[in-house]
Image (spheres, helix red, strand yellow):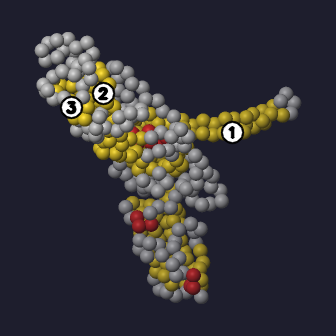
């Protein structure tokens, strides 16, 4: 089967406690780049190349979301998104003849050392007379009150007032001067397709798991008159052991790449089962809780332990030992030998057997 990785991936970024900090499901692009430096080791006559030492490996990811994503920027700068803050507010105030003192609906806050705002008038008043001064600074004389300054004190009609006030519905992000980008777990989900010249279909996904990923703290927001600003983030994978098995031979990982195909079973490509160790002997006192270890073999993959619930076990001599049908757990009955058999429940032609000898 030919498989192709197409389009963009969905991105999910979690903190150390598993909280989803941001997700990007409208991305324009995603890229994963692996680099490694190398040093030639040479010696002997003619400075021969003896071997090459590879070092300073790195794995970088770049994501660009077409949407404005404040949570992405927060994680990039190591901060958080909050609500209820002070913002510049605009509202329309109607000025009627003889009104004198006017009022805005919210409570203005001090800004730049004073309690003031700005008023914008149209180019002409209601009588059609041209206004020479249309943008003016105003001072709030009380909580929400102000008056139009000269030369427009007698103006009637609508004005636009801009001032600084608290907005409980506003969300905000504060970027610290000493940026320390967030570190967490990044997951990229991309689609796999297959097809011919006449058809193409999605057959599954490729999942990139970065168990430890640190954003790089840098971003650029580009705004143009004829464009839409995007939200970019980038970072680097950190060496991590949380996905390892705990064996002495384990090495730290940057990323785990997993292929998941739709409507498939783990055993579709399995061509053999192997009971670990083959025939074996065991003292009856040790049979309690002993589980038969089984490995599956498939092309182009390392042997792996399949889900034991998908296997069927049986014992040829139940007077010696019994075995859990879908658990592989032995239970002692008597001394002697028994032929233990296992097969894949959904693929009965794939099987293996061994002889167990139970001693006193």
Question: Residue at 18% of width from left, 21% of height from top?
Answer: 154
Question: Residue at 58% of width from left, 54% of height from top?
Answer: 241
Residue that numbered label 1 is attached to: 54
Q: Label 1, secondary structure: give it.
A: strand
Q: Give me the C-alpha separation between circle 1 and circle 3.
A: 77 Å
Residue 106, quarter of picture: top left
Query: Does 96 appear above or below 181?
Result: above
User: Which badge, 2 or 1, comes first in the chain's sequence?
Assistant: 1
Q: Residues within 10 Å of mark 2 (few under 14, many from 20)?
A: some
User: Which badge, 3 or 2, comes first in the chain's sequence?
Assistant: 3
Q: Label 2, secondary structure: give it.
A: strand
Closest to the observer: 296 or 89?
89
Residue that numbered label 3 is attached to: 101
Quarter containing the N terminus: top left
Q: Give me the C-alpha separation between circle 2 and circle 1.
A: 67 Å
Residue that numbered label 2 is attached to: 138
Q: Nearer the viewer, mark 1 or mark 3?
A: 3
Image coordinates for residue 69, horizontal then vertical, percent: 38, 38
Q: Nearer the viewer, mark 2 or mark 1?
A: 2
Closest to the observer: 318 or 286?
286
Q: Nearer the viewer, mark 3 or mark 2?
A: 3
Locate residue 343 relative to residue 358 in the image: left or right.
Answer: left
Query: Does 355 appear above or below 134?
Result: below
Closest to the observer: 28 or 247?
28
Image coordinates for residue 113, horizontal then vertical, percent: 42, 34
């Amino acid at each position: 089967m030919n498989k192709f990785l197409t389009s963009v991936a969905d991105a999910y970024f979690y903190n150390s406690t598993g909280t989803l900090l941001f997700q990007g499901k409208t991305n324009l692009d995603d890229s994963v780049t692996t680099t490694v430096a190398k040093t030639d080791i040479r010696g002997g006559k003619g400075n021969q190349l003896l071997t090459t030492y590879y070092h300073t490996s790195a794995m970088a990811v770049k994501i660009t979301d077409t949407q404005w994503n404040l949570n992405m920027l927060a994680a990039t700068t190591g901060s958080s998104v909050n609500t209820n803050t002070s913002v510049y507010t605009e509202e329309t105030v109607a000025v009627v003849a003889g009104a004198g003192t006017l009022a805005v609906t919210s409570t203005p806050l001090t800004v730049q050392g004073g309690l003031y705002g700005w008023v914008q008038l149209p180019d002409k008043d209601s009588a059609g007379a041209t206004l020479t001064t249309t943008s003016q600074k105003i001072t709030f004389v009380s909580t929400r009150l102000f008056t139009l300054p000269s030369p427009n004190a007698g103006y009637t009609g609508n004005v636009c007032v801009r001032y600084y006030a608290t907005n409980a519905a506003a969300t905000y992000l504060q970027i610290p001067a000493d940026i320390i980008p967030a570190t967490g777990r990044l997951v990229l989900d991309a689609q796999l397709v297959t097809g011919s010249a006449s058809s193409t279909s999605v057959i599954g996904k490729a999942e990139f798991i970065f168990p430890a990923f640190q954003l790089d703290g840098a971003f650029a927001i580009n705004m143009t008159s004829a464009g839409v600003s995007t939200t970019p983030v980038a970072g680097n994978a950190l060496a991590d052991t949380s996905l390892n098995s705990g064996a002495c031979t384990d090495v730290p990982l940057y990323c785990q790449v997993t292929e998941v195909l739709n409507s498939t079973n783990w055993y579709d490509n399995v061509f053999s089962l192997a009971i670990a160790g083959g025939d074996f002997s065991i003292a009856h006192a040790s049979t309690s809780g002993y589980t038969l270890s089984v490995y599956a073999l498939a092309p182009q993959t390392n042997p792996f332990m399949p889900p034991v619930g998908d296997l069927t076990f049986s014992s040829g001599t139940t007077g010696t030992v019994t075995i859990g049908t879908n658990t592989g757990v032995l239970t002692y009955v008597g001394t002697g030998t028994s032929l233990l058999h296992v097969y894949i429940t959904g693929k009965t032609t794939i099987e293996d057997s061994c002889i167990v000898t139970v001693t006193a």
